[in-house]
Image (cartoon, rainbow, N blue to C red):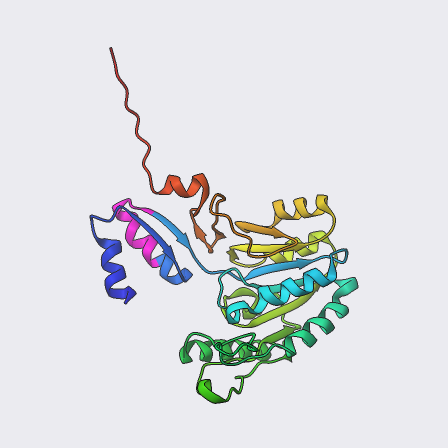
């Protein structure tokens, strides 16, 4: 386990650098252990990633990609977009279409070709996700779709399935908008203008990734500069290239994987000077 094998690796004097992908609490523990030994640390941690949807977006393309970014792998991807902010003029249209399509997602046995979403990783994790949904309700949010275990028959009848869930009216301080749920759960809120969208996106302790949907290239670049995330996708999601840096800001981690920054982590610069 991490508490034994992982901790021993972090503490061992023969290990000079630690690259870790996982939860923020574990990352903080690793950093506190590695710091007194002056070890290099690269941490890719949690996220609660914002999707900013402006009224001038390509609506059909945005909708198809947003469904995928919300529920792919049952939401168990650190880069999933779990906070969706929609410009007010298209908010009702977005919610209606998004809830309709979410309700049509087929949950079931991953081996069946018609299945679109499988289970979460464990019974304990399913319980944590369901508890987060119930907490959102207690905080005054409304569940428009899902919110409960999904009934599956056949080979996977006892699997850890959850209905894909859409939440509205969750205040910005609600745990669903501040903590990482890491499951098929998204919140949807309206924003009024560009400044409001950036404010909402940044109002979270995480800063891993974000997505901006707009046809206005100038706006997309302004928002990309202003949003506090290590990765910003414009009119897309989960486009990766190992030649480019990847990593988060704030409590989503330190350091970068990929690109020259990633290579730099695994090397040490040395000055060799011949003096005649």
Residue 34 lies in the magenta-colored region: yes
Residue 110 seen: yes
Q: Nearer the viewer, residue 206 or 65?
A: 65
Residue 168 lies in the magenta-colored region: no
Q: Nearer the viewer, residue 1 or 68?
A: 68
Quarter residue 64 falls in: bottom right
Quarter residue 276 falls in: top left
From the top left corner, tell me how far across and down residue 263 is, in percent.
Answer: 39, 41
From the top left corner, tell me how far across and down residue 195 is, in percent.
Answer: 70, 52
In the displayed structure, does residue 91 sit left or right of residue 46? right
**Residue stretch rendered in magenta on the structure:** 29-40
From the top left corner, tell me how far across and down residue 76 is, in percent.
Answer: 48, 68
In the displayed structure, does residue 67 sit left or right of residue 43? right
From the top left corner, tell me how far across and down residue 242 is, in percent.
Answer: 47, 47
Residue 143 seen: no
Residue furthest right in the image: 89
Residue furthest front in the image: 113
Q: Which residue is located at x 45 percent, y 84 percent? A: 156
Residue furthest left in the image: 13
Q: Which residue is located at x 62 percent, y 74 percent? A: 166
The image shows residue 249, relative to residue 49, as above or below, that is above
Q: Please tell me whether the stretch drawn in magenta is mainly helix, strand or loop.
A: helix
Q: Quadrant of the N terminus?
A: bottom left
Numbered marks: total: 0
């Amino acid at each position: 386990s991490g508490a034994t094998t992982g901790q021993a690796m972090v503490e061992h004097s023969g290990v000079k650098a630690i690259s870790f992908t996982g939860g923020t609490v574990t990352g903080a523990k690793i950093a506190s252990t590695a710091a007194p030994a002056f070890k290099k640390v690269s941490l890719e941690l949690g996220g609660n990633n914002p999707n900013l949807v402006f009224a001038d977006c390509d609506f059909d393309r945005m909708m198809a990609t947003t469904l995928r970014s919300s529920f792919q792998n049952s939401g168990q991807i650190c880069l999933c977009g779990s906070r969706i902010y929609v410009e007010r003029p298209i908010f009702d249209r977005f919610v209606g279409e998004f809830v309709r399509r979410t309700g049509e997602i087929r949950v079931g046995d991953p081996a069946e070709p018609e299945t679109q979403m499988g289970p979460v990783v464990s019974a304990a994790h399913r319980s944590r996700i369901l508890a987060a949904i119930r907490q959102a309700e207690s905080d005054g949010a409304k569940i428009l779709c899902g919110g409960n275990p999904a009934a599956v028959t056949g080979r996977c009848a006892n699997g850890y399935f959850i209905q894909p869930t859409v939440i509205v009216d969750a205040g910005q301080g609600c745990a669903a908008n501040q903590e990482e749920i890491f499951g098929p759960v998204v919140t949807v809120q309206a924003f009024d203008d560009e400044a409001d969208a950036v404010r909402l996106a940044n109002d979270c302790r995480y800063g891993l990734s974000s997505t901006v949907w707009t046809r206005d290239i100038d706006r997309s670049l302004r928002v990309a500069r202003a949003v506090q995330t290590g990765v910003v996708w414009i009119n897309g999601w989960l486009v990766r290239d190992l030649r480019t840096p990847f990593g988060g800001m704030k409590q989503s981690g330190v350091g970068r994987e990929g690109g020259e920054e990633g290579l730099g982590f695994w090397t040490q610069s040395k000055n060799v000077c011949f003096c005649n």
